[in-house]
Amino acid sequence: MDYGQKGAWARDALRNAISAVASTSSSMLAVRDVQNSGEEDGDPLDLIPPDKLEYLLKLVQALFDARFIASCYNIAVLFTISVFAVLHWRESRNDRRQWLARIRGRKSDSAKKTTTTMTRTAQPPSSPASSSRSSRFSPGTSTPTGNWKDSLVDLERSPLLRGRTSSLTINPTRLDRKPTISNTVSSWLNRQPPPIPIINRTLPSNGTSLFIALWILLNVFFQMLLTPLRWDYFFVFGDKMGFMFIVNLPLLYLLSAKNQPLRLLTGYSYEALNIFHRRVGEMMCFMALVHFVSMVIWQFVLAEDWMLASKSAWAYFTHPLILCGLGTFTSYELLYFTSLGSFRQRWYELCLASHVVLQLAALVFLWFHFYTSRPYVSLSLAIFVLDRLVWRLRFKRATVTADIEVLEDGQTFLLSADWDLLARPRPSQHQPPWWKSSWSFFSFNPNKSILNGWLPTDHVFLTVPSLGGSHALQAHPFTIASAAPIITHSTSAAGKHQQQPTHAWFNLLIRSYSGFTFDLLRHAQAGHTRVSVQIDGPYGSSHALDMLRASKSAILVAGGSGVAVTFPLVWALLQQPNRDLLSDAEEEDDEAVAPEEEEEEEEEEEDKVVRRVSPLTRQKQRVHMLWVTHSKSHRNWIPQEQFDELVALGLDLVIPEPTEEAGRPDVAGIVKGWILDAASDGLESGVVVSGPDGLNRTVRNTCADVIGEGLDVRIAVEKFGW
């Protein structure tokens, strides 16, 4: 569109605007003069002085140009998501190939390695125990050779466990690597700085902070692009800031949705993206503030008298358009304050309720405040309604009867339930891939609820209606502490895959704080140890499990209740594949190895390879776990029988003395020792940590240090920021 066409278009827009407000009080004196002229025929623009008309036309043209540029912002967002999707798909493909290559038993230097880790022969697991609490953590237990606690006695009494690292057999020749620029950059991106002094606010990794900074710069770029930097065009700046607020709405609601396509596209579930959701919300609140202040400055300071019908503050702030804007601004600012960490920790229930009420009110106010916002408001409302009412309430929620057991410390309790898994259709070679199914793109699977099973690191939202009051409407998130159920399939005579009957043992390890958890603990202590609960989920991502499976050395670090994350992962790495092997032992030779193929796309082929691997081949992966506890009573959170079985399968388990007795162990030294031990044999390491912020930062920075030295290490931090 050339300048002449834009000018004609601006004149038409201004003429239509004057006609629209002809029967109401106008904010422009020029329009008021036209109304008072008494002329009913002719072009109303002819009555405006030429110099003022030229300015108004340029102002209108600048407004629409600014809004068009701002509307292109989501194109940049979609492009960024597509880039991350390509990177995720490539990484997932490589991880799967590495995992299949390892379990097929390809030649590896790890077979020649002799370590100081206690070697055990894998024993067939026994049947599930029916009367012990340990049976609710996994499908069964086995009798290990030896007692893992015996091997921990001397280790626990060593000073801060520093001797653990020095006892490893490390080949220094393989560690003599010259760091590259890529190693230096990757090390810096993975490093996590200390908390901000005084306010003690935890900072994310440098890579996350850099991404957030680039996103902020993207918003600044679109805000300032072709925006006239003149005081007489200041209205354009304020209006565009409001429009930038609007175009960010769908992204804000998409990041907050529990069921969303971003998990499929990027591999990150909503809880991992929660930090971006908060930054988007904070940025939008800042935009709303700037928009509000800019409009007030324009109205009472910068606008010339001939453009205003009145400078009365009462007339301005009581106008319906302004009242709706104030309602939107107030709602989102209250959302920000109720989302602060200090508020959430004290009044979590109020935070949940306010989020639902305030965001619905804000969308309604915005709908009437700004006509152009309605497509974005409609899309945001659709995301909210589909996530809350359709998927979460209709397809994801299940009601089960659970038992509550208060543990030894009196502040922790175990909520347990069990059921027979509902059958789910298994993908077959005739089923079209996910990209040819529109429903799968939105993770729409009505059969996928907690009754169908879950994966390691998954979490659920728990509601206990019997607590009464507002608790019946509240859903609180908890990580599933029990091992994921093992789902096996068989092939019928007709060639169809059928799911075998499987029993699930479900556990939530809950620490009592204020509010919901405190009331539930008191409810159990009052004798109500069997309750009906509503479970919404599961939610989560397999990113950590995929990374560990692809690594030849898996390192898991847990702090306190973080064991609810690491224990299911260890079980999936060691126990679950072995059960698949044993279930088909009568059909496959134990020493058989699947043929090497470069392309394996079907899930059933992956399971076929898993079942054909011998136990000795599978044990080529080294699995280490460090669990830091505060008191001895915390060790009872996971039954000894479960650790016995995992140690028998090859787990290198380290549980230092409780920190309340011996102080903090040398976590960095232990983790670095395991990484160097693997690197000396040319093995890459995958590290997963879940615990307090200080522990997470220590492990992350330890990995960043060795990455900077040129070693092959990947790190994943499993911590939810509710």
Image (spheres, helix red, strand yellow):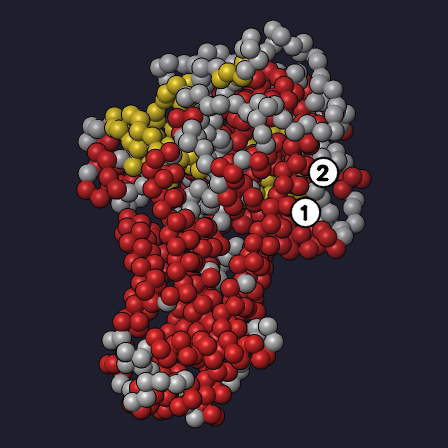
Q: Residue at x 76, y 52 (%)?
A: 180
Instruction: Find residue 456 and report its horizontal and vertical position in percent.
Output: 49, 32
Q: Residue at x 49, y 46 (%)?
A: 272
Q: Earlier in the sequence, mark 2 or mark 1?
A: 2
Q: Which residue sits furthest front? A: 41
From what the image shows, is residue 656 above or below residue 307? Answer: above
Query: What residue is pinned by disc 2?
Result: 679
Q: Residue at x 56, y 45 (%)?
A: 266
Query: The residue tagged with tag 2: helix, strand or loop?
Result: helix
Q: Amino acid at mark 1?
A: Val
Q: Residue at x 65, y 16 (%)?
A: 612
The label number, if any, that marks residue 706 in the structure image: 1
**Is residue 478 among the parts visible in the rendering?**
no
Instruction: Find residue 554 and report its horizontal and vertical position in percent.
Output: 61, 34
Instruction: Find residue 62 and report its horizontal and vertical position in percent.
Output: 51, 78
Q: How many marks?
A: 2
